[in-house]
Amino acid sequence: MSRIAILLLLASTVSLAQQPPAAAAKADARAAGRLMQQAKAALPETSGTLTVAGLRQPVTVLRDTWGVAHIYAANQHDLFFAQGYVAAQDRLFQMELWKRVGQGSLAEILGPGFVDRDAAARLVRFRGDMEKEYAAYGPDTKDILTAFTDGINAYIAERKASAKGLPLEFTLAGFEPEAWKPEDCLMRMSAYSLTYNAGGELYNAELVAAMGPGRAARLMDLHPKVQLDPVPGLDYAGLTPDLLKNFVGSDSRIQFPGGPRNGAAPEPDEAAEFSSPKPEASADDPSLFGSNDWTVAGRLTATGKPLLANDPHRTIAEPSLRYMVHLVAPAEGDNRAWDVIGSGEPALPGVAVGHNQNIAWGFTIFPIDQQDLYIEQLNPVNHNQYKTPDGWKEIEVVRESFRVKGGEPVTRELRYTRHGAVIWSDDKRALVLHWVGEEPGTAPYLGSLAVDRAQNWKEFEAAMEKWKLPSENIVYADRAGNIGEHSAGLAPLRRNWTGLLPVDGASGKYEWSGFVAMRQLPHWFNPPAGFVATANNYVLPPQYPYKVGFDHWSSPYRVDRIRDLLQGQKAAGKNPPRKLTIKDMQAIQTDTVSLPARQLIALLRQAAPRSHDPLVQMLMKWDGNMRRDSPAAMLCEFWMNSLRRALTFRLLQTPDEPADDKLVARVEPRLPLPLVIAHLRNPSRAVFGDEPVAERNNLMITTLATARANITRFQKGEPDAWRWGRTHTASFRHPLDQIAAGAEAFDQGPVERPGDGNTVNATGGPVGPRPGTGAYTQTGGASYREIMDTADWDNSLAVNSPGQSGEPGSPHYGDLIDLWNEGKYFPLSYSRGLVEKNAKDKLVLQPK
């Protein structure tokens, strides 16, 4: 479809704002219908035979009922060429945006508002030896990336030459995809967003500057327990997480500007937006990086073989962040046979989580500290110099040019010291980021290329040496009956500081001395308990000698609940205990019981044992299950937030001064829930005054009243009529939903959701600002789930939401939402026979 035709289509909707609501809604629906017709007309061929330049031998692609592509190639080159081609068929627009995020080239398509974000992406780009970079992942990585990107390029060339033209999204967005290069898969911006803890250091520095290290530490739940260690005499004034607002990964929503107004095309810089991480985002919120995984030994399962479950959590959006694929090719020369299925990201080759012929694996973020901030002292007479132990040294300057939509190119200076990229400076100081992404082999998830081919624990452990980013707790199971876990990632060695605050860059006292050996990171093989479970929780053993992180571990609620459920049959006194099944794994993954809710209700029983207040009674009669239809779940969620806010004020105030409102706004979302509950469980005079128990009891009752008042902003009627799911929803938003009729055509949802950020089925997110739109919108969680049965791979299950395709109009664009929302799965077909039985489309790619 031509650009002119699209503009005419969009121009037909510009008068909607002047129409009555009902008429406007009908006109919008008609416009959305026309968009979808055009989208369907531009869909790729997924059946039949296509001739593709670049292949060496024919490739067969079987897409099953749920849109998963099973790719059968005769050699490794064609396998990854086809993976790139097929992924582009389903997700080209998403992949192009992902590439531009990493390249720092968004301003070219979105205007000058993105130049600062592009500059940040280029600041953290890998600038080392490219041969060492490729070799760090494996000897054939460059060949794999070349084949993969050649496949993407073949599809782009095909679409540009075809009568259909490019997918509709490109026409609507007003740009064309550019050719890919192998190094486009090595971008670091997405890796930066999966590492910690520059933002935490700046938050801690802001608190230390405002109230000193002692009071600041009272607001943190550090593991292991340590003291904040500010560098004597170092100036932390003016440091704030806001300084990182332009360091945004590929997870964050990109919003294209709205459609034409009054028949005219939008201005080049009009309304283009991106969602940068809010400094107030809670470091304790599991939805930020939460995931669950566990592996269970055969002696605890009904089949006598291990079961493995994983639901990695990232952003909830349209298209899905995850892309499922099955890769099959025979061994040839030094290349092993490929037969791996699971999920990854569409812009990367291989499979990040899944199973092959003999092993299965899954992961959760292992939130170690892989970033440090240095404050460099600038020369007062020459701000291009900074102080080192050897005297003043010139700041390295790299000039980069940025193409800008609707304007002239812009040149920016990127500045570097010996510690890394300068992310901010004033007349006296330069704030510098030193992080593991500067090292070879730290492009995210490419370590999975080694795991994909591992066939036993020994080979899996060897593959862990190549897994540097993101740091993950990787669970393992194999067909021989073994289970295990290895927490993997590149962990800096800090000899004499914690990494919780920025340090002095001039003295030379705060330097990394290498990295923790992989064998020294936590790992288990066939543990006595018969299972291993992780959920981004604190996994380090007692007296662990390395300072790998203190403040980004998730609260223990999800992992504690998983362990309780895995041990539930034994705890229930059944003899012998009932063996665990795949259905049990499903029930655990979708469990919505809130352990902190149960802990708070136990405290409420102490605070108001004889209360007849209907709200108190509602909670006391509740089982803590955050079901969609639960009034008590609604009340409890609002109550927890009221309690957090009240405790924040108390912790920030002093006998002489009330709490500062700006500081309250910063601290409240980041105040760890376990710390809130600890203060309520053991009320102190420092927080609650001379009669701490009575004041604690009063606070728990008054905050219930506050919660009720806040609920009435979103739901009317008596408490018994409240419904958690009516206020707690998930929507799958497309980057083009701001164009005329775009939301109606491209967005999916909203759907009512159970759970919250602390349940195993983690459905957390920020509080929405507007009544009637869903106060608690799920923005992160398990869009992908897998359950692997080592007794018979064909019994394995998975789900990926909203669908496999990112192409509007595709039957697989949103076909998995209902399955996902209802906690259901589809079969993960593996054997050729089952794949062919469930195949819906067959595409043969022939070499030219």
Image: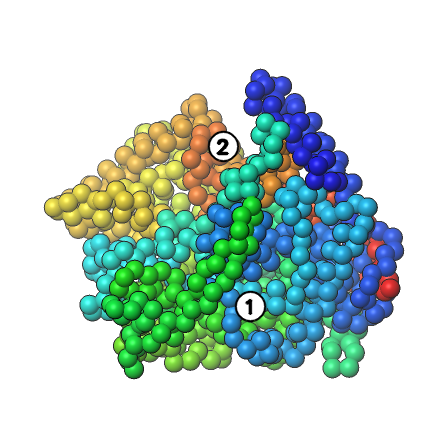
Label 2 SS = loop
Q: Is residue 393 left or right of residue 334?
A: left
Q: Is residue 545 left or right of residue 646?
A: right
Quadrant containing the C terminus in the rendered view: bottom right
Q: CA distance from mark 1 to mark 2?
A: 38 Å
Q: Residue at x 34, y 69 (%)?
A: 384
Give residue 173's position: percent from left, percent from top: 63, 43
Q: Is residue 336 above or below residue 606?
A: below
Q: Which residue is mark 1?
A: 443
Q: Earlier in the sequence, mark 1 or mark 2?
A: 1
Camera-near label (1 vs 2) is 1
Q: Residue at x 22, y 48 (%)?
A: 652
Q: Residue at x 46, y 75 (%)?
A: 521
Q: Which residue is mark 2?
A: 773
Label 1 SS = loop
Q: Is residue 815 visible?
A: no
Give residue 522's position: percent from left, percent from top: 46, 73
Q: Residue at x 28, y 79 (%)?
A: 391
Viewer-closest of 572 and 665:
665
Quadrant containing the N terminus in the rendered view: top right
Q: Is residue 207 visible?
A: yes
